[in-house]
Image (tube, rainbow, N blue to C red):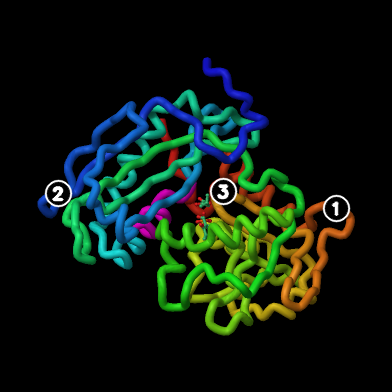
């Protein structure tokens, strides 16, 4: 048995035993290689290092009460990684290869899957990088696909407790026709400065607005935004946000519990009208938002006035986790067992 304090795990990197790798060379993918090294050896002119040809994914596996490992919606992540690959002109990873790689990485690190009831999970991080050299700005001809896993706890240290978000018009994350809708590493570098300013002010994240008009809500750093009012689940529609698989799942669950779902533009003043608001993502799960501060207008929007998450956010959170942990029937076919 390994000695990990599962209940107090942060969302961070922890070494596991193996990762899985394969290269795309001469127009085709090679075989999957199991590696125990945490390092990669790469050409110094690799396109990922110079021109940001890189995309990644994030998904989770959970241990059920029945001792079975459940992988959540891997196919959506595989499809999204290929959407990123196309946008950044990288080689796509066939769905079967993607699946084999993640299952292999989980199977060889079974002892790191956090136990049922710990609140932690195994985070799976596939990444695709241009590893071949170029000096002119051109796509690489060689790509490396790696999958590593690491056990994680909640992304926002508050866990399922209300967090604060900052609206600041001084920073943009992604342009409307840029790369915001794919999971390019460069999007995260572009958001680092804004995020560090938010953190220094005690905010969990920046709530980014659309960068053209600065009028509509885009997303919450590494998570999508949703608001709830009058039994409607409302989430922004924007060309510069990442289509979150968690958000997609919450929309299905909201419909299942009899709510209406709207995906549309959300203007900042509409924040006043929501009964509950939250951030959602693989890492964040649901993070209820207790307060949003709009810096330029010196205005704050307050929710969760009793200090607790709202009833609908709580219900959606519990339902999602119950499916992931195997406590509730997987009606939607979201779970793949790893044996
Ligand atoms: N938005 C951004 C920018 C993200 O990085 C993530 C995390 O993957 C999300 C939203 C949430 O997406 P998902 O639910 O697929 O993890
Ligand atoms: C995720 O939710 O999987 C993310 O990728 C968020 C963040 C750690 C980048």
Position of 66 relative to 337 (above/below): above
Q: Which residues are magenta?
A: 72-81
In the rendering, which numbered label is found on residue 307? 1
**Numbered-mark total:** 3
Q: Earlier in the sequence, mark 3 or mark 2?
A: 2
Judged from this view, the residue extending furthest toward the left is 26
Q: Is residue 98 left or right of residue 207?
A: left
Whether tag 3 and tag 2 are in contact, CB under 8 A, the answer is: no
Whether tag 1 and tag 3 are in contact, CB under 8 A, the answer is: no
Position of 66 relative to 2 (above/below): below
- Residue 246 at x, y = what percent? 55, 56
In the rendering, which numbered label is found on residue 279? none
In the rendering, which numbered label is found on residue 25? 2
Tag 3, which secondary structure?
Answer: loop
Tag 2, which secondary structure?
Answer: strand
Quickly name the residue at label 3: 283
- Residue 335 at x, y = what percent? 48, 45
In three-dimensional space, the C-alpha distance between marks 1 and 3, rounded to whole angstroms, equals: 22 Å
In three-dimensional space, the C-alpha distance between marks 1 and 2, rounded to whole angstroms, equals: 54 Å
Can residue 236 be seen here? The reply is yes
In three-dimensional space, the C-alpha distance between marks 3 and 2, rounded to whole angstroms, equals: 32 Å
């Amino acid at each position: 048995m390994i000695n990990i304090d599962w209940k107090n795990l942060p969302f961070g990197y922890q070494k596991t035993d193996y990762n899985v790798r394969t290269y795309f060379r001469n127009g085709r993918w090679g075989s999957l290689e199991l590696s125990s090294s945490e390092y990669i050896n790469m050409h110094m002119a690799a396109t990922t290092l110079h021109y940001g040809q890189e995309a990644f994914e994030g998904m989770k596996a959970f241990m059920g009460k029945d001792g079975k490992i459940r992988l959540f919606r891997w196919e959506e992540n595989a499809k999204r990684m290929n959407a990123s690959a196309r946008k950044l002109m990288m080689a796509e990873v066939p769905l079967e290869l993607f699946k084999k790689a993640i299952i292999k990485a989980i199977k060889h690190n079974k002892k790191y899957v956090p136990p049922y009831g710990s609140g932690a999970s195994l985070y799976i991080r596939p990444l695709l990088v241009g590893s071949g050299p170029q000096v002119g700005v051109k796509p690489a001809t060689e790509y490396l696909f790696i999958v590593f896993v690491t056990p994680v706890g909640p992304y926002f240290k508050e866990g399922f407790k209300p967090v604060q978000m900052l609206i600041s018009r001084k920073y943009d994350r992604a342009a409307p026709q840029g790369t915001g809708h794919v999971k390019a590493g460069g999007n995260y570098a572009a958001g680092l400065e804004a995020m560090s300013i938010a953190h220094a002010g005690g905010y969990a994240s920046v709530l980014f607005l659309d960068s053209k008009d600065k009028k509509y809500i885009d997303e919450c750093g590494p998570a999508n935004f949703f608001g709830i009012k009058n039994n409607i689940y409302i989430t922004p529609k924007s060309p510069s946000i990442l289509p979150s698989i968690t958000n997609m799942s919450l929309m299905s669950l909201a419909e299942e519990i009899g709510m209406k779902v709207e995906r549309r533009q959300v203007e900042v003043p509409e924040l006043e009208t929501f009964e509950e608001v939250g951030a959602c993502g693989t890492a964040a799960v649901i993070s209820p938002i207790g307060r949003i501060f709009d810096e330029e207008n010196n205005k704050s929007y307050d929710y969760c006035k009793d200090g607790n998450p709202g009833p609908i956010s709580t219900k959606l959170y519990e339902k999602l986790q119950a499916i992931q942990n195997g406590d509730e029937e997987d009606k939607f076919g979201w779970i793949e067992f790893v044996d």
